[in-house]
């Protein structure tokens, strides 16, 4: 981004339900612009990507999880960088109260852990914090279920 006179748009990614950070956050943080290029960081992740994705860098990664234990694992797994922020808290409350907007929001096998009654409110709030042209990616189980567990992974 930004080479050859093209306008530069910072890419910011929010992951709801980041857990211990591996593999999704680890991969995304390997694409951080603020990391020095080394065989252990960016190039290792990029070897699995094809152009034009292989040229993508992100400026900021924010991971939100309700579990202090999972965030502790994520702090160990992710690079220490000003472009990485981990937040302990409820994903719905985070998206309702953040003043940030994001280029991309993702949630991999996490939304179904919160009560279905709040899914509509959560999705509405996610749309509000997406930048124009932003992308929301999430996964959900193939069968309907409440999915909610009071004590999921020590949360």
Image (cartoon, rainbow, N blue to C red):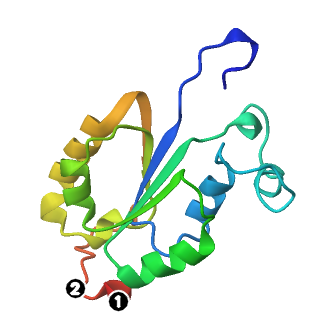
Q: Is residue 118 left or right of residue 50?
A: left
State the SS at label 2.
Answer: loop
Q: Quadrant of residue 145?
A: bottom left
* Label 2 neighbour load within 10 Å: few <14, some 14-19, many 20+: few
| Mark 1–mark 2 distance (CA, rounded to whole Å) | 9 Å
Residue 120 in the image: state x and y as whole percent. Answer: 17, 50
Q: Residue at x 52, y 73 (%)?
A: 74
Residue 138 in view, yes or no? no
Quarter of the image with the N terminus is: top right
Residue at the (59%, 57%) spot, across then down: 81
Q: Quadrant of the C terminus?
A: bottom left
Residue 104 vs residue 144: left or right?
right
Q: Which residue is mark 2?
A: 150
* Label ID, residue 154: 1
Relative depth, front residue between 43 and 105: 43
Does residue 80 appear left or right of residue 106 in this picture? right
Whether residue 9 is visible: yes
Taking 153 as reference, is 48 above or below it?
above
Helix, strand or loop status at disc 1: helix
Report the residue at 82% width, 57% height from top. Answer: 44
In the picture provided, is 34 more to the left or to the right than 151?
Answer: right
Q: Position of residue 138 (x, y in %)?
A: 42, 53
Residue 105's spot in the image, x, y percent? 42, 47
Residue at 61% in and 73% down:
77
As drawn, the label of residue 60 is none
Count of numbered circles in the view: 2
> In front here: 81 or 7?
81
Q: Position of residue 43 (x, y in %)?
A: 83, 51
Few, some or many residues within 10 Å of mark 1 (<14, 14–19, 20+): few
| Outermost residue toward the top in this view | 5
Q: Quadrant of residue 146?
A: bottom left
């Amino acid at each position: 981004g930004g080479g050859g006179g093209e306008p530069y748009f910072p890419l910011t990614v929010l992951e709801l339900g980041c857990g211990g950070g591996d593999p999704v956050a680890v991969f995304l943080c390997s694409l951080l612009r603020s990391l020095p290029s080394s065989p252990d960081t960016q190039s290792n992740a990029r070897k699995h990507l094809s152009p034009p994705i292989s040229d993508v860098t992100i400026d900021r990664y924010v991971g939100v999880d309700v579990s202090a234990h999972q965030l502790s694992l994520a702090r160990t797994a992710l690079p220490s960088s000003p472009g990485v922020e981990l937040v302990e808290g409820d994903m719905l409350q985070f998206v309702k109260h953040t003043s940030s907007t994001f280029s991309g929001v993702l949630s991999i096998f996490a939304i179904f852990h919160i009560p279905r009654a709040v899914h509509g409110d959560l999705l509405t709030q996610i749309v509000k914090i997406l930048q124009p042209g932003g992308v929301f990616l999430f996964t959900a189980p193939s069968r309907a279920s409440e999915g909610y567990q009071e004590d999921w992974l020590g949360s």
